Image: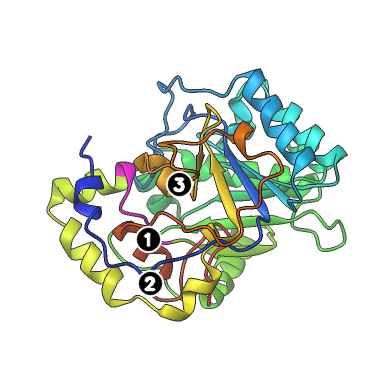
Amino acid sequence: MHDPLPLLVNTDFPPVERARLETLQVNVGYRCNQSCVHCHVTAGPKRTEEMDRSTAETVVHFLEAADVDMLDITGGAPELNAHFRYMVEQARYLGIHVVDRCNLTILEEPGFEDLAEYLAEHRVEVVASLPCYLGKNVDRQRGKGVFDASIRGLKRLNRAGYGDPASGLSLSLVYNPQGAALPPPQTELESAYREELGNRYGVRFTRLLTLANMPVGRFASTLLSKGQFDTYMALLKSAHKDENLDAVMCRTLISVDWRGFVYDCDFNQMLGLSMRYNGSPRVHLSELMHKDLNGRAIVVRDHCYGCTAGQGSSCSGALS
């Protein structure tokens, strides 16, 4: 695996400061039932890093102490973590909106047959990766048979009420480009997804989120192996828009890894770029109870251009 960090350090990315903290994003581990080509986490079935109960309890204590609106749970496949449901239930008890970053195929794994109904019962928003509405493209990026399993997973979620405006259960699909290119306009692509998935499979969803592939993790390694890393970085930099800086996700989000250490975003987490706090080389979530992070400088490197290029990209899709 190639390490892209040395190529990202000498950056001219503009400085960014934090606003009010709204979202606690928690990566509960890198174990996954899939191994996707574009995965910046480099997740897979053989990864063993997983959040333990003590760290999960620290997450809940932080939710109790902080004025956050959302708990965003990711992985790997977050549902594989033994404490996933504990965190969901505790956050919902506190009135906090919960997002599950679901890969859809987990719905077919043994022991997860009730997952769709569980998520619906607790009013969890599902954000599901489906990088194309064509099966061959999805299978090329995510593995053979993944597209068909994803469609079956979407239908399970639909039966539980997801994607139905009357239910209020939000189901967002996530698009990633197949290679070293920026995503197309989100609104136009969403219309194509609705037509294709609706007409072919009877699938409904709430919205489409388009995300740029970040030059981090498995995707960065692929770029380096193909000699495309510099070209892709030049594309991101040439498409940078200053107006996207106010909306980048790191201004209102912190990212917590499976051990409880804190980063300005999930991409910084994968690069090992810890949040700066009181001169410490890294900070644990337990140290931030009742702390105001507003106005603090965010750690930036050249990969940050992936969030400001073109229409912009964040965990919530396009920025503009």
Q: Earlier in the sequence, mark 1 or mark 2?
A: 1
Q: Nearer the viewer, mark 2 or mark 3?
A: 3
Predominant SS along the magenta part:
loop
- Most foreground residue, 58 or 177: 58
Task: Please name the residue shown 52% across and 69% down the image.
Answer: 318
Mark 3 and mark 1: Cα distance apart in space: 16 Å
Place of residue 237 in the rendered image (x, y in percent of width and height, measured from the top left)? 28, 71
Q: Is residue 247 visible?
A: yes
Q: Quadrant of the N terminus?
A: top left
The kind of residue tagged 1 is Cys
Q: Which residue is mark 3?
A: 276
Q: Is residue 115 visible?
A: no
Q: Residues within 10 Å of mark 3 (few under 14, many from 20)?
A: some
Q: Residues within 10 Å of mark 2 (few under 14, many from 20)?
A: many
Residue 214: say if magenta. Answer: yes
Mark 2 and mark 3: Cα distance apart in space: 25 Å
Give residue 236's quadrant in the image. bottom left
Mark 1 and mark 2: Cα distance apart in space: 9 Å
Question: Which numbered marker is on residue 309?
Answer: 2
Q: Earlier in the sequence, mark 3 or mark 1?
A: 3
Place of residue 12 in the rendered image (x, y in percent of width and height, measured from the top left)? 27, 67
Q: Which residue is mark 1?
A: 304
User: Regarding mark 1 in the picture, which secondary structure is present there?
Assistant: helix
